[in-house]
Amino acid sequence: MNDIETVRYHAVARVLHWVIGLAIIAEIVIGLGHESWEGATWAMPVHKATGITILVLSMLRLAWRLTHSAPTLPATMPRWQTKLAHGLHWLFYVMIIAVPITGWVMSSAGKYPLNWFGLFDIPKLPVIPKSALADFAHEAHEVMGIAFIPLLVLHIAAALYHHFIVRDGVLRRML
C-alpha cells in the first residue's frame, strides 16, 4: 500500500466531511425528536441554524471538491463498489445542499423568524404560506431527511467494512 499521506483527502476536505457529517447526525436527532421533547423550545431554532450552517459548509465543500480531486480508491476494490461509492458520494452532495434549502424554503413560509443561533437574522425567502412550493418543500425536506438515515448507515458500514475486514485504507483517507 502507498504511504498514507499520498492517499488521504486534503485537511480541508476532511474537516468539512466530519463537521458536516456530525451536524447531519445531530440534525436527524433534533428533527425527528423535537416533537417528543416536552418544552424543548430550543430545538427548532437550533435545527434551523444548524441547517443553514450545513448549507454554507456544503457549498464550500462542493466548491472544494470540484477544484480538488479525491484520492483514488484502491485498485483492489471491485468495480461495483467503486461505482456505488462514487454514486453515493454525489448523492450525498445533492442531499447536503437540497435538504437545507428545502428547510429554508419551508421555514420561510412559516410564522417564526429565522436567525443564526441568535446572532443575526437569516432572510426569509419569498414563499407564500400553504402554497404548493411550501408544501413541496415540507414533504421533500422530511423525505430526504429520513432517507439520510439508511444512506448514512450504508456509508458508515462501508467505511468500517473497508477498515476492519478488507483493511484497504479507505477509512484512513478521511482520518
Image (cartoon, rainbow, N blue to C red):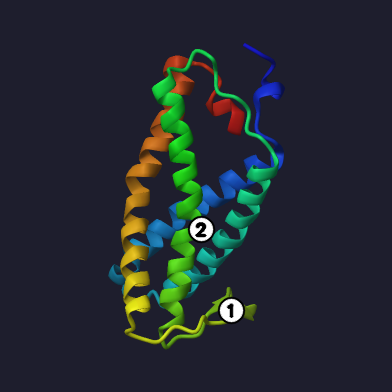
Quadrant placement of the C terminus: top right
Q: Amino acid at mark 2?
A: Ile
In the foreground, 65 or 167: 65
Q: Amino acid at mark 1?
A: Ile
Q: In the rendered structure, are the residues bearing label 2 and label 1 in contact, judged by CB atoms less than 8 Å apart? A: no
Which one is earlier in the sequence, the residue at label 2 or at label 1? 2
Residue 63 vs residue 41: left or right? right
In the foreground, 44 or 144: 144
Residue 68 visible to an observer of this rendering: yes
In the foreground, 85 or 148: 85
Crowding near the residue tagged with mark 2, few <14, some 14–19, many ≥20 C-alpha atoms within 10 Å: some
Residue 106 location (% of width, % of height): 41, 75
Q: Which residue is mark 1?
A: 122
Residue 39 visible to an observer of this rendering: no
Residue sitting at 37 percent across and 86 percent down? 129
Q: Which residue is mark 2?
A: 97
Residue sitting at 44 percent across and 78 percent down? 107
Residue 145 location (% of width, % of height): 37, 57
